Image (cartoon, rainbow, N blue to C red):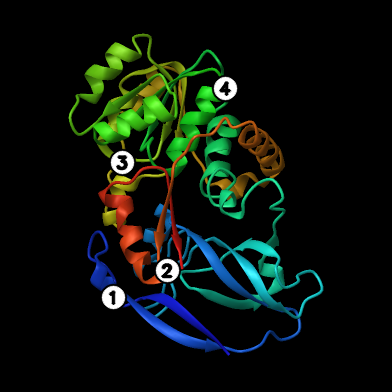
């Protein structure tokens, strides 16, 4: 028997989640049945979408029942397998959940080639919710051009970091919005983008007037709320606004504040389009090829922040709202 430690939802949050909304439980896992594999989880991806599953309302990513294991993507190593496509020692990606071990059908897992790229990169630069999302939003949906002035909100987070670097790699002028001087230094000194704006200590509108006097051509938005309106007021003619997320709204999903200045889209013949990466499966192969090549060429400099211990999964999830830099993961 294998002991699995998992994080479960103990109570539904009112607004943003708190630590007392979660609990930790143990269970015993048996041997794999035919077609199954037992996996030891190595790294779990901490993503904003997880927080949208905590309410009673069944949203795009579903709703976790009270006592249910929190959903999460992750990578791990096969301990034992009763499926021909997987063997002990194989490293895999899949919907691991917030737990230390998983016994599940082998078909749920994607076998990884880790000869040149470590497994955890499949949660970061090559991750579906991180690098793949950034690529699809910036290039497939946003139509990135080397002449663009690009703005990325929540630019120091995981998806925002990769989106900012894709803009830089593509030759665009990239302006990142983030909170605090440490994050601005990260954007400018480590990611190498043109400029960072500290929304906590600077006037975003005034800084955009200075940094993008001819307007913003492409806006990759992870925040929503007032930041979305501030940038909408400064879009260039024929601009593209890409809605990836709205972390400013996740604490009140039943009362989301939409943009007040959406008429700027009509006035400037611009477009605004929301997306989720799974709708763009036809673009995944090209995205994976380009991201892998740039990763091997050492063009990405995103930080990795690994929190040790499955019991700290809730703490890591709350870091999304209190501020962190780069790709956040938990190592059970």
Q: Residue 48: where, in percent of width, then height?
A: 40, 53
Disc 4 from disc 2: Cα separation: 38 Å
- Report the residue marked by disc 4: 170
Count of marks, rendered view: 4
Would you identify the image quadrant in which residue 1 lies? bottom right
Instruction: Tell me if label 3 and label 2 are in contact, CB under 8 Å.
Output: no
Instruction: Tell me if label 1 and label 2 are in contact, CB under 8 Å.
Output: no
Decide which of tag 1 and tag 2 comes sooner along the chain.
1
The label nearer to you, 3 versus 2, is: 2
Disc 1 from disc 4: Cα separation: 45 Å
The label nearer to you, 1 versus 4, is: 4
- Report the residue marked by disc 1: 11
Decide which of tag 1 and tag 3 comes sooner along the chain.
1
Give SS at disc 3: loop
Q: Residue 62: where, in percent of width, then height?
A: 46, 65
Q: Nearer the viewer, residue 311 or 166?
A: 311
* The label number, if any, that marks residue 258 in the structure image: 3
Disc 1 from disc 2: Cα separation: 12 Å
**The furthest residue to the left:** 201
- Report the residue marked by disc 2: 63
Give SS at disc 1: loop
Is disc 1 surrounded by few (<14), some (14 to 19) or many (20+) residues within 10 Å?
Answer: some
């Amino acid at each position: 028997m294998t002991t699995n430690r998992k994080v479960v939802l103990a109570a539904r949050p009112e607004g943003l989640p708190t630590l007392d909304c979660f609990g930790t439980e143990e269970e015993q896992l048996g041997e794999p049945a035919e077609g199954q594999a037992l996996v030891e989880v190595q790294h779990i991806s901490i993503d904003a979408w997880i927080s949208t599953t905590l309410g009673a309302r069944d949203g795009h990513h579903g709703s976790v029942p009270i006592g249910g294991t929190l959903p999460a993507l992750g990578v791990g190593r096969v301990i034992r397998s009763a499926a021909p496509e997987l063997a002990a020692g194989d490293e895999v990606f899949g919907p691991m959940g917030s737990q230390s071990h998983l016994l599940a059908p082998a078909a749920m897992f994607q076998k990884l080639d880790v000869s040149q790229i470590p497994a955890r990169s499949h949660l970061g630069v090559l991750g579906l919710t991180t690098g793949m999302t950034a690529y699809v939003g910036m290039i497939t949906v946003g139509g990135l051009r080397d002449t663009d002035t690009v703005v990325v909100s929540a630019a120091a987070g995981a998806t925002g970091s990769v989106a900012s670097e894709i803009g830089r790699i593509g030759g665009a002028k990239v302006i990142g919005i983030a909170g605090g001087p440490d994050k601005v230094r990260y954007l400018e000194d480590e990611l190498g983008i043109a400029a960072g704006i500290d929304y906590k200590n600077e006037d975003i509108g005034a800084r955009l007037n200075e940094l993008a006097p001819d307007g913003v051509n492409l806006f990759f938005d992870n925040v929503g709320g007032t930041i979305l309106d501030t940038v909408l007021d400064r879009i260039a003619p024929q601009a593209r606004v890409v809605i990836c997320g709205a972390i400013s709204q996740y604490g009140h999903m039943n009362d989301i504040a939409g943009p007040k200045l959406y008429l700027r889209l009509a006035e400037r013949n611009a477009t605004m389009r929301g997306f989720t990466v799974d709708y763009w499966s036809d673009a995944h192969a090209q995205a994976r090829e380009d991201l892998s090549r740039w990763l091997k060429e050492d063009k990405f400099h995103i930080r990795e922040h690994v929190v040790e211990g499955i019991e700290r999964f809730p703490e890591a999830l709350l870091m999304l709202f209190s501020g962190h830099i780069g790709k956040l993961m938990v190592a059970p």
